[in-house]
Image (tube, rainbow, N blue to C red):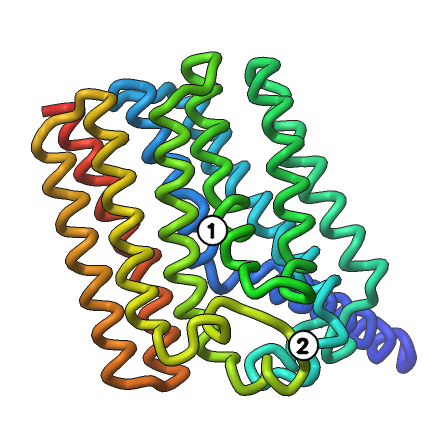
Amino acid sequence: MSMAGPFKMTTSGALSMKIGAVSDLIRLPKQQGTLLVLWPTLWSLFIASNGRPSAKLLAIFVLGTFLMRSAGCAVNDIADRDFDKFVERTKARPLASGRLKVKEAVFVFLTLSILAFTLVLFLNPLTIALSVVGIMLASVYPFVKRFSHFPQTVLGMAFGWGAVMAWSAVKGDVGLVPALIFLSNVCWSMAYDTIYALMDKDDDIKIGVKSTALFFGDRVYLALALMYAGFAALMILAGYFEGLGPVYYIGVLIGFIAFLKVVSSVKKSPTREAAYRGFTANAVLGGVILVFIILDMNL
């Protein structure tokens, strides 16, 4: 009896720590990234569905977004485990700190990817085929920073691919409008992930990884404004070719002005805290744009 209690407590404690490590691996307490993947997916889904997507498609893409973003976090940490321990922001991550083994993280990644792919099997053949590209983009992204200053571009492609899939799931094809939404998201993702990369500039220089924040240097704030302008211009074009109404354009304009405000705030206070606030603001503003899309198509 005296040994059973401590043994049970130790086993329970170890399991609890492992669950906590998996939670940190997939960023369960921090869902800003999931929202940043979800918003362009829903922009496309609602536009393709004339403002009223089916409950089935809505559920598949919301859950699928969570699963794939979580899988992306896992593969990112697997790829960066030898870098993360030297970066102030990431040194406590489960693989960098030794709380998880690589094989455990691989298991989490494969499990989440299989679950996400299972959801896609309820969609049409074209969307199933497109999902393979999405998994490839999510898997390749973490390695781009080793040889290119533009990993943020690949991130934008990975994060925006859901918009292409959502359109395909509704329409059964892919045309100009989803392509424009996809490209607008590449611009948007490059902007907010460049802001995110500002937090790690000094550490990235030391360990030799690349980013758009380092590439643009002193011109980074001008580059951010131009990226957001590209986002707005492409969204306006998407609205024009789809024949959307004035509420939609007002939403895009409000979003663009708010994004420029974010750039100004980060520029005034170039700290890690300000950069993180600027990054998280994007996760909120993407939802604001979705509200205007829904209003425009249902009024």
The residue identified by callout 2 is 84
Residue at the image position 63 percent from the left and 34 percent from the top? 133
Q: Which of 95 and 252 is in front in this view?
A: 252
**Marks 2/1: CA distance?**
21 Å
Q: Nearer the viewer, residue 246 or 57?
A: 246
- Give the answer, above or below, for where 119 lies relative to 227: above
- Give coordinates of residue 71: x percent, y percent: 64, 49
Specify whether 181 is left or right of 134: left
Given this view, does label 2 or label 1 mark the residue nearer the observer?
Answer: 2
- Which of the image's four quarters has the C terminus? top left
- Examine the image and state in which quarter residue 295 appears: top left
Residue at the image position 51 percent from the left and 58 percent from the top? 152
Residue at the image position 47 percent from the left and 51 percent from the top? 34
- Which of the image's four quarters has the N terminus? bottom right
- Give coordinates of residue 135: x percent, y percent: 65, 39
Dot label at residue 34: 1
- Give coordinates of residue 229: x percent, y percent: 25, 52
The answer, for residue 283, to whether it is visible in the render is: yes
- Give coordinates of residue 124: x percent, y percent: 56, 14
Check disc 2 and report its element: helix, strand or loop. helix
Specify whether 24 is left or right of 48: right
Check disc 1 and report its element: helix, strand or loop. helix
How packed is label 2: few (under 14 Cα within 10 Å), some, or many (20 or more)?
Answer: many
- Give the answer, above or below, for where 271 lies relative to 221: below
Specify whether 48 is left or right of 91: left
**Identity, as a three-letter code, of the amino acid under mark 1:** Thr
Do the CB atoms of the residues marked 2 and 1 lie less than 8 Å apart? no
The answer, for residue 13, to whether it is visible in the render is: no
Residue at the image position 62 percent from the left and 47 percent from the top? 138
- Give the answer, above or below, for where 134 lies relative to 265: above
Q: Nearer the viewer, residue 60 or 6?
A: 60
**Identity, as a three-letter code, of the amino acid under mark 2:** Asp
